[in-house]
Image: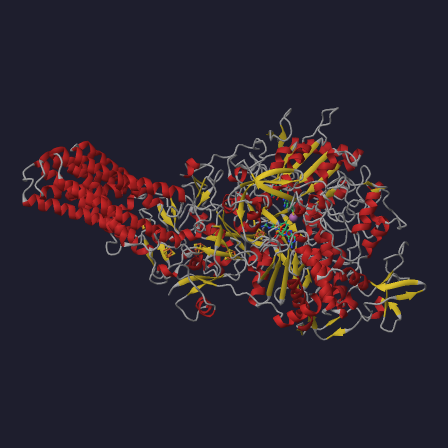
Amino acid sequence: MKPAPQLLVLTLGQGLAGGMTASVGFLASIGGLNHRLALLLLGAALFCAILGGGASFFHMHHFSAARYILRRLKTSWLSREALTTGLFGGTLFLLTVATVWGRLALNSPLYIALAWLVTFFGLVAIFVTAMLYASIPAMLSWHSPVTVLNLLAVGLLGGSGWGGFFGMVEHGPSGQLAAAVAIFLVVTGAVKAFQWHVFSLARHRIRATTGFGLPFAPYRLQDSGTTRAPYRTQTQVHPVISDGLRLRMAVVTAIFLTVLPIVLVILSQIAAEWGWMLGAAISITLGSIFERWLFFADATHSSRVFFADEPREASRVAEPVMRGRLS
Amino acid sequence: MQLTIVTDLNKCVGCKSCQVSCKEHNTSGAYGPVPDAHPRADVDGMWWNRIVTMESGAYPNTSVMYLPKACMHCYDAPCVPVCPTGASYKREDNGVVLIDYDSCIGCQLCMWACPYGVREFDEEEGVVKKCTLCIDRLEDESLPEVERQPACVQSCPTHARTFGDLDDPTSEVARLVSTRQGFGLLPELGARPSVHYLPRRPEPPRVDKETLEKVMAERYE
Amino acid sequence: MAQYLVSLHAQDSTSSTLRHMHTTCYMCACRCGIDVAMEGDKVRFISGIPENPVNKGVWCAKGGAGIMTEYSPARLTTPLMREPGAPRGEGRLVPVDWETALTTVAGWLKDIRRTDPRRLAYFTGRDQMQAFNGFWARQFGTPNWAAHGGFCSVNMAAGGMYSVGGSFWEFGWPDLDQARLFLMFGVAEDHPSNPLKLAISALKEQGGRFVVVNPVRSGYGALADEWVPIRPGTDGAFLLSLMHVLYRENLYDRAYLSAWTNAPGLVIRAPGTDKDGLFYRTEDGDMWVALDSGELVPYAQAQGQGVLEGRFEHEGLELEPAFQTLVREISAATPAWAEQVTGIPKKTIVRLALEMGMTALQHPIVLPIAWTDIYGVQHTETVGRPVAFHAMRGLAAHTNGFQTIRALFDLMMMLGTVDTPGGFLYKSPYPKPVPPRVKPAANPDAYRPNQPAPAPLLGYPTSPDDMLVDGDRPIRIDEAYSWKYPLAAHGAIQNVIGNAVDANPYAIDTLMIYMANVAWNSTWNTLSTREMLTARDETTGEYRIPHVIVFDAFDSETVAYGDLVFPDTTYLERWDATSLQDRPISEPTGPADSIRQPILPAQGNARPTADVLIELANRLELPGFVDEEGTPRYRNYADFIQFWETTPGSGVGLLSGFRGSDGKDELVGEPNPHQLEAYASHKAFWQYELPDEHRYYRMANQGYLEWAQRVKFIDTAEPLTLNLYSEPLQTFRLAGMGQWPGKSPQDDQLKRRLATYFAPVPIWYAPLEDRPEEAESFPLRIITQRPMTHYHSWGSHNTWLRQLLNENPLFMNPIKARELGLSEGQWVWIESRIGKMTGKLRFSDAVEPGTVWTWNAIAKGPGSWALDPQSPEVRRAILINHIIPDRQAGTKDFFNNDPITGQAGWYDARVRVYPSERHEVWPIVDARQPAAAPPPDTDYFAYRSSQSQGR
Ligand SMILES: Nc1nc2c(c(=O)[nH]1)N[C@H]1C(S)=C(S)[C@@H](COP(=O)(O)OP(=O)(O)OC[C@H]3O[C@@H](n4cnc5c(=O)[nH]c(N)nc54)[C@H](O)[C@@H]3O)O[C@H]1N2
Ligand SMILES: Nc1nc2c(c(=O)[nH]1)N[C@H]1C(S)=C(S)[C@@H](COP(=O)(O)OP(=O)(O)OC[C@H]3O[C@@H](n4cnc5c(=O)[nH]c(N)nc54)[C@H](O)[C@@H]3O)O[C@H]1N2
Ligand code: SF4
Ligand code: SF4
Ligand code: SF4
Ligand code: SF4
Ligand code: SF4
Ligand SMILES: [Mo]
């Protein structure tokens, strides 16, 4: 499908914010939080959250109806997302204000509890967002618990990367921080690998036999109703990325999101230089962006059966002449 | 009551009359317009009903199939619960799934939720649009009887489409579905589409095999 | 930028009430009845009229999209004249006022008519007023008029007229309400559109079996119970072998052949004499037939008892029934032979023949309808042979098409299905005599200055004496009715430009083109044809065709070539008639016709073409249009429709309903000055239901024939004997062999063609493009199909229809592609013997492996049709006309036409396909200047007839 920039920013921002808040809680819990560190991390988290929230706002096209957005809390994960993301953003803001205000002792049980509470709201927000994707049967690639794990893992990993970096700047090498990052790296790597498998299964579920009740496969789509598939109006289907692009993006994602950071984290510990950790955090963030792009771009929607060919058959969709206009 | 359309794939020739009559009626109808982009250049527009052409089987046993695809007015319409504002809703009195443009925020989540790719997005108005089962025709008492049915049903030159209440076992649609093995698309996704299709039913050759073999062997081998 | 077609504010509340107007659709040639709902001054909705006999309330994609044709940005709204000094073809046209345009053209035409009326060539494309146009040209006095039939389907029309006095298409029809078996040959997706869809639906409803014979499976073919993929151009062989099996299995209707066809007629066998192959006739001209007893009696007296086989001698002449000649021809056409030619397994051929024969003979339909035949025999019931056929250009558009279609009709006669329930049914005013008794004047002196032609310009020759030749020299610019194309019953529009440029047989002054896109999709070897239109005489520097006048409603490719362009209105803005004098919209159940009425005002300064032609006729004082004093009889076409009669006082005019001063007469009656109003208030059509006893066997139904004579469909109530054997063809063969006493060709090549192709019983020969020496170099056949959503070039300026189809790949069977090492989506060269072009490959298992195909007329020239030059129609669509040869292989003397009728051999072209290094459509012609600056493109275009309910 067409990855909407707003959704990339929203999910990345929300994940990073949640992850960074978690770092705050973690650092506080291990007694490693100081004021500067707290402000840096909370500031960055708030920045990401605002970026994400802003993006999600602009993902709406019909602002005047925004007032109805909480109407369907009972059924709609999007309604719930508006609520939980708002709750997270709000409490994050309050925690930041409280931290700036400076009256709360940073490593006090109260602060620790508050930090973990906000983190909890953050994780709930990520969970709800992830459920929004995971609960749609038609989004064949996403309709699985892996989607929830994936969003949580990538968010926590991103946050821990930055937590590790800021922590190292303040305190020098910390085995605990490095271990936390490393654990998230391994978990995320595993989740990601599993999810790509799920994506591949989803692609192969696109079959005319169910889509059409046709007796003989293979089938060949000759026409989707208009000469070309509807780029503007069917964003959940088009464009379909090529095998080559998918593979390249997956390799790049794997390198930036896990392989390179692992090396960098290890180097940071050996060399005791926070520069390596900064590299790891940046690499993870870039990797998350690639990961998220691929998460959207490569998602298979069931209606693709009516708009594109079976795998391995070239798509009938011609190159658009006016690329600019159609992108 | 569940109003719906049943299409006989044994009769659909893929002429796209229903695709155009849909746009023709609805662009000026209560839920219009049904817009287009770049009408003079690389035109790309909104259609609530698209005829999909599919080839299957290997030559010479090739089959060519046309499938008119609009909103399936699902019993368990997945587009409805996902909608945060309640803009997408299913009418309780007749099962028609509709969108209230005034409360739609244009988030397009319903487009993801719909398994069939029949919802389309109007960028200018910022709302999602789709087949309304021509509800504005069905309920307009000023229209003559022949027009109080979906435009796509009225125009279909092969009378492949039948409109009616699937929940009424005496209706024509219910009869067709039960007697002709009517099926819905992508049943595994659980939307329980009310729109049904009737499969092909090829007429076999009118000469039996033995007669043919005999004639062949006697005179034409 | 958003563009709404209706302003957001200015709509008063009354505009939301709908006004319903009735008229006849013109988005294709089907002529369905449509209800146009108007909201204010905008079209709200177009739908089918339920009572209309053609479409019975349904409408197609094109019909519904008529709204976008009305509001097309490509409309011409003012007369245009080529900019002084600008070369022709670049589209540099400037608006002129009507008076200037009319005076200029009237000046040219007056000059021509005064000196040599032949120097006006008037040719029309898919127009629907051929009766009027033919009358206009005849009054002008030129022989050079024809409509589009030559490049369309004259083989189908002529093949039927010379066999059964009717044909498929607008002249006859498969009775799918009752057929048990239906075979469709060479019909794409939409011919005709709504009527055939309704009929196929009826067939499916009653459980009939549907077999499609076509190299491609799509459209109607997709619904077939069986697809018979045939090699293009080989149907004749297939049909002959079907007849072979029917004959051998004794599955043919002897009684039918003896009673209603000339199969028992005794043919003289006297090779080398001028009688050879002609019927042995009585003094009154009746055929002799033999009875079982051996006794010879005139056909009319034999009462259907004539024998079909045997040899007889009479007065020293050797005689044999005509059927015997057919039997001889088909005896070699074994299924094994046909399998080699057609690619259809012989077992399939035998099975299909058995299915046909057994269905026809062993499962007849018997209707409780009594009727009386020409022999005076009263039948208590009507017997039908429920095997129906339909065929079109897949048979017709080959250079062996005429004989193939003859074969199809002979097969139908063998099965006894012509005008019987469940079979082929005529549409009024058909059947006509075989062939219909109209002939153009054959004498060169018939076309003199300032006088009308003495006879209609088109018709059906019955012997070489009817040829329009002066020795071997053609009289007509298109060489119709010359030795090259003797039975060119529809003229040959595709020959005109080439001949005019070569001054062959003579130069012309003015070419008038109405509703034909001859600079693009209805021409072949397109690039050179475009050059011909701008070719100049080397010595004088003048154009070889000095004046080109174009009547068009839209800014087509051809408009760019007009020296003067007349802007027509759309079909929703003019009076018009579909007429029994033209191509009827009748049903098998009886005659019908309809009108168009202006529902919207004309846009800008557009004027209906017929009105313009009448204005010109009045200025030229053409007889027939003005009275003795020179006073116009008709102010406009509406007048013409109501007052014109075939001959003064005949009571027969363009419309058959609401005739007579009180509007109470039907078919025959005085002109009615309120006829159009009467139609308008009767939902724009008129229909007459034949009583049951007149509905079948009409060629031999005494009651029907008498009625048909009374209403002037036919001159006399004589039986219309079907021609299993075509004596007219044999006369041409005699001329070719130098044995015809009358007009004959001198040139050897011309003689050879007559002798070879004019067989009196159907034959099959390979299409003329199939040359053994090229079998390897051009192994594939390339053909086109019409898409259901587009009517030739008409759809690409229609915002809605454009989206349904705006680019076209070359479809190829993957089996063949693998053989050639080609892959899906690859750019390829498509090369014929005259040139090459590129295209993008698309695999399809629904095409016979020796054939490649694409859609017809989707590609557009840059600058035309108000399209952006980057449009997919320009950049991604291909036009195979570029590489379809215009001349017959190995000669400049003949066009790529059927040697009998002059039908264009569109589907004979052979190509090779190989990878292309060019990844774009090629060739692309130079961009022309649009007739008017097209409106700006927009991101958002939304048509609403009213904003009252809008957001
Ligand atoms: N390769 C290939 N070529 C083919 C064929 C094929 O099968 N394959 N088919 C052939 C056949 S059968 C035919 S009939 C021809 C058709 O070829 P044409 O007769 O040339 O048909 P059109 O492309 O429809 O072009 C007719 C012109 O009519 C104009 N027009 C439309 N409506 C109106 C109107 O209301 N008034 C006026 N004055 N003009 C109007 C259009 O703008 C257009 O310029 O093409 C032939 N060409
Ligand atoms: N929608 C739409 N309808 C139209 C038109 C249009 O442009 N658009 N044009 C109108 C006009 S002018 C005409 S003439 C008619 C033409 O109506 P058709 O004759 O149906 O049209 P074509 O597209 O020429 O289709 C020819 C068919 O013959 C097949 N064919 C080609 N060669 C052979 C062969 O050798 N044997 C057999 N058995 N089949 C073969 C092709 O695959 C194709 O399916 O349609 C009319 N109706
Ligand atoms: S786009 Fe509109 S209708 Fe669809 S889910 Fe969002 S608010 Fe609901
Ligand atoms: S087809 Fe799609 S839009 Fe229609 S009711 Fe079902 S899920 Fe909703
Ligand atoms: S029911 Fe109405 S809105 Fe739905 S596809 Fe048919 S015409 Fe379009
Ligand atoms: S109008 Fe009827 S025949 Fe044509 S595509 Fe639609 S359902 Fe099929
Ligand atoms: S078939 Fe369609 S385009 Fe042709 S006349 Fe009928 S409604 Fe019009
Ligand atoms: Mo045609």
Q: Position of residue A222 (x, y in %)?
A: 50, 50
Residue nearer the viewer, C406 or C602: C406
Residue nearer the viewer, C585 or B53: B53
Q: Is residue C735 left or right of residue B186?
A: right
Q: Position of residue C206 (x, y in %)?
A: 57, 68
Q: Position of residue C252 (x, y in %)?
A: 73, 68
Q: Is residue C498 left or right of residue A209?
A: right
Task: Give the position of the N terminus of chain B as an image quadrant.
Answer: bottom left
Q: Position of residue A279 (x, y in %)?
A: 23, 34
Q: Is residue B125 left or right of residue A100?
A: right
**Residue C586 seen anywhere in this rendered image of the structure:** no
- The answer to which quarter of the image holds residue A285 is top left
Q: With respect to residue B123, does C288 lie above or below?
A: below
Residue nearer the viewer, B36 or A312: A312
Residue, far bottom: C380
Counting every numbered tag in the picture gives 0
- The answer to which quarter of the image holds residue C384 is bottom right
**Residue at image x 43%, y 55%?**
B70
Residue, far right: C315
Q: Is residue A199 left or right of residue C814?
A: left
Residue nearer the viewer, A183 or C807: A183
**Residue C375 seen anywhere in this rendered image of the structure:** yes
Task: Give the position of the C terminus of chain B as an image quadrant.
Answer: bottom right
**Residue at image x 61%, y 56%?**
C229
Q: With respect to residue C513, does B155 lie above or below?
A: below
- The answer to which quarter of the image holds residue C660 is bottom right
